[in-house]
Amino acid sequence: MKATFGEKVFYGVNYAILALIGLSCILPMIHILALSLSDAQAVVSGRVVFWPVNVTIESYRNLIVGTDVVNAFKNNVILTVVGTALSMACTIIAAYPLSRRDMYGRRFFTLAIVFTMLFSGGIIPHYLVIKSLGLLNSYGAIWLPGLVSVFNMLVLKTYFESMPLEMEEAARIDGCNEWRLLLRIVLPLSLPVLAALTLFYAVGFWNQFMNVLLFMNDPSKYNLTVMVQQMIRSQSMLQELANLQPEDIMNMTPETIKSAGVIVMLVPMLVIYPFLQKYFVKGVMIGAIKG
């Protein structure tokens, strides 16, 4: 069907707005990438905008040699992998029983969980609870408070509910108990939504900032986000890079080192996104709409 003039105007405005939003997101990243790959003199003279000048990887080498970025990267990986695995396991264990129509008190437990989505105790009670549990300066303080996202749990519950009852009945006739039904039938058929939720949790743990800043007292346990934030705030960063030779310090600026740190923090998630993006529509949208 041929689009009317009004529809063409509508689509044109939409495309223009989306293009502006896309550019506002990607241009700062391109600028930071160009800074990290440019020569220090070009950065100081202000000649770097969206394309690197006198391309060099010295800022990345100095970042690795002169800062604690390797340890921070390792901490980020531990936080993300362990936290995502624990969160996915607990989300599945919570969502599956609530999706069973014959569960006693199903409505009450669902409303009780949704209640926590609407109201929060705030930062100070949160800190006091973590302190009373003895979790300060441990990664348990990061993993436990965000162990189950109510939104993700509801999406997964809705997806489970959309599966046909006939399939479950056939599995039970063949001798499946609840665990075998979950592990052999339900989860293999839920790979799209599981992949999407895994990505949501992984991004959340990878970008953890406030909880690490609040609960970690030992700088050796900082993740990349906090380390980069402290690098950006530090006005004497070059003097703190004690592992570098004087000639190396002469060939770099704080802007190039900070930009390299931001790129190191962004790259892992940018690499993972394209592989899981195709599951978003199949997983999240179907899980959110059905039922």
Image: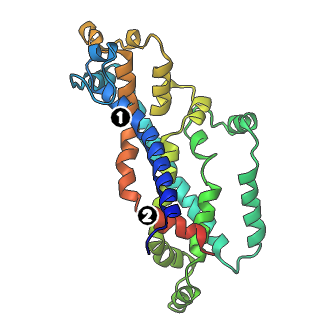
Tag 1's secondary structure?
Answer: helix
- Does 76 sit left or right of 120 as displayed? left
Quarter of the C terminus within the rendering:
bottom right
Asked if residue 70 can be seen in this view, the reply is no
Q: Is residue 273 above or below residue 187?
A: above
Location of residue 87 with respect to 51 vertically, above or below: below
Density class for disc 1 (Cα within 10 Å; few <14, some 14-19, many ≥20) is some
Three-letter amino acid code at the position of disc 1: Ile
Q: Which residue lies at the image location 65% right of the left edge and 57% below the top edge?
A: 150
The quarter holding residue 166 reads: bottom right
Residue 129: tell me if it is visible.
yes
Mark 2 element type: helix
Residue for point 71% across, 76% down: 103
Quick check: 235 above or below 158? above
In the picture, the quarter occupied by the N terminus is bottom left
The residue furthest front is 5
- In the picture provided, is 68 more to the left or to the right than 128? left
Give the Cα distance between marks 1 and 2. Answer: 27 Å
Q: Which mark is residue 30?
A: 1
Can you identify the residue that label 2 sits on?
279
The spot of residue 183 in percent (x, y) is 49, 73
Residue 162 point in image, percent of width and height: 58, 77
Callout 2 amino acid: Tyr
As rendered, which of 140 and 197 lies closer to the eye?
197
Nearer the camera: disc 1 or disc 2: 1
